[in-house]
Image (cartoon, grey):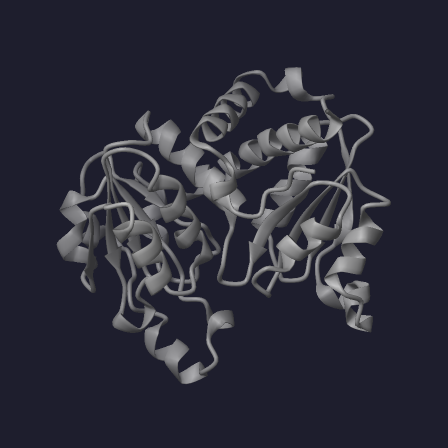
Amino acid sequence: MRSLIDILELSTSELDELLSTANDIIANPKKYAHKCDGKKLATLFFEPSTRTRLSFEAAMMELGGNVLGFSEAASSSAAKGESIADTAKTVSCYADIIAMRHPKEGAPLVASMNASVPVINAGDGGHNHPTQTLADLLTIYREKGRLNNLTIGLCGDLKFGRTVHSLINAMSRYEGIKFVLISPDELKIPSYVKNDVLEKKGIPYSQTTSLEESMSQLDILYMTRVQRERFFNEEDYLRLKDSYILDLPKLKNAKADLCIMHPLPRVNEISVAVDNDPRACYFKQVLNGKYMRMALILKLLEEAAK
């Protein structure tokens, strides 16, 4: 049974296939309107979410399928102490495919080992968020027309940001990629990402604390919020939360075709004044997430049916 827990489980040819399907869905929505008639998606969200949960639900509905699930752990049997394994086995009796978000790293993997239907990791703690990365890849491809020869600035919380870790893993497989890692010292990229991905693969990168000094060289600027829920110490969060705020003056040296991205939700790290700048792509990213989740659901259900 094929699940998706980590973006690296998809080969570059499979990523290209998903991008192609998503672009076809955008061009021909009616062609896909009944592809999942009679199928059910279970959304098991043990952690708050707006975009990811609703985009999974919208994706399944636009494919003609139905949705069931819960949006917080307190409304599931986890509140009674049920294990992830038992939840996965149970929900497999009701649904054809599962999307799971959980605050604990590895929980969706445990679910996939016990479910009898495909499981999609919709975010596990500070670890992985593969479908956000699919949304990111489609956004970059549609804005830039390519996934190679790009300088990508990652700014903000690079330590706990699962979207950042997944994007580095995905983009590191394309040629001519360079990363500029912009963060406070306390929120630098984890050593396992730096050593096992960037250095192991010989991918050029630089680390800096200055967003302004990096701006002129970037093709992509990927902003992230400093995540209160990942901090053990409220004082540290309050000290670091406003480390980087992107506003129009900071964009004065940026390229005219810079693509500004953010996995959302934003708190105050991008000024609302930037929303009207043609380089702002973060709400396009939201829409692209729905299309890529549609493509992924189709792929996993087709493989499960073989």
**Residue 172 against residue 85 in the figure, above or below:** above
Residue at position x 76%, y 65% from top? 83
Q: Is residue 282 above or below residue 76?
A: above
- Residue at the spot x=33%, y=74% of the render? 240
- Does residue 214 appear left or right of residue 59 in this picture? left
For the point 45% across and 50% down, the residue is 263
- Classify the position of the N terminus by image quarter: top right
Could you tell whether 130 is left or right of 49 in the image? left
Given residues 208 and 2, the one toward you in this image is: 2
Tell me if 206 is positioned left or right of 63 in this view.
Answer: left
Q: Give the image location of residue 34, x and y in percent.
A: 74, 21
* Residue 242 found in image quarter: bottom left
Is any part of residue 126 visible from this angle?
yes
* Res. 177 image quadrant: top left
| Residue 158 visible in the current orientation | no
**Residue 74 horizontal/vertical position (percent):** 75, 68
How many labels sit on residues?
0
Task: Out of 94 and 247, give the one closest to the viewer.
Answer: 94
- Residue 297 lies, in percent from the top left, at 65, 33
The quadrant the C terminus occupies is top right
Q: Quadrant of residue 298?
A: top right
- Report the residue that reaches farthest toward the front: 200
Q: Position of residue 6 (x, y in %)?
A: 52, 47
